[in-house]
Image: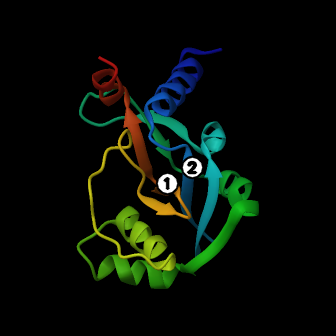
Amino acid sequence: MTTNTALFASMIDTYNDMAYTHEYIWGFIYNHNVYMAHTDSKVMPYVCKLDKASRGAGYALRFCPNTDQKLYLMPKAEVVCSEDYFNNMVENSKYNNGEIFEKIVTERYGQTWEKDNVPFTKGGDITVDGVAYQIKFQKATFCNEKSLANLTK
């Protein structure tokens, strides 16, 4: 096992040890549509990657799915909206892609979305039928080495 492979596995394990929920709604664009896929944390090694973090924070755990990873999620996925609709929503708001995806998903479940900063250790982004989910859109960062080190002190 290479050092990066070990670090990748360790970061996923540490993140999951501290996470409030292990249920996810993954968002991604494929063939001009925005999809959401419901899974648990067991898919993280298959859809996430290790990447350089910014500002000297070591490595980061990110959800940046390539085509194969999107196809891996597809059996659990459904279309949420068109890519054009999504891009229009982003362009006409002060929120980023992840926040707009979270808003669309929340409203799809008949709930009112409000931007919050609840840490992943304290709650999910949405609760549906009593199940808390974290919502992640493509290019999302889960954590970096520095933040995990601070949380495990």
Horizontal relation, residue 76 to residue 127: left or right = right
Point 47% across, 80% down: residue: 110
Horizontal relation, residue 143 to residue 67: left or right = left
**Residue 120 horizontal/vertical position (percent):** 38, 43
Asked if marks 2 and 1 touch (Cβ < 8 Å), the reply is: yes
What amino acid does circle 2 point to?
Glu
Point 54% across, 15% down: residue: 3
Find residue 23 and name its label.
2
Find residue 132 and name its label.
1
Mark pair 2, 1: CA separation: 7 Å
Mark nearer the N terminus (2 vs 1): 2
- Other-residue count near label 1 (Cα within 10 Å), few / some / many at <14 / 14–19 / ≥20: some
Find residue 117 and name its label.
none
Instruction: Say which quarter of the image contains residue 113.
Output: bottom left
**Residue 43 horizontal/vertical position (percent):** 66, 43
Name the residue furthest front. Answer: 130
Is residue 93 among the parts visible in the rendering?
Answer: yes
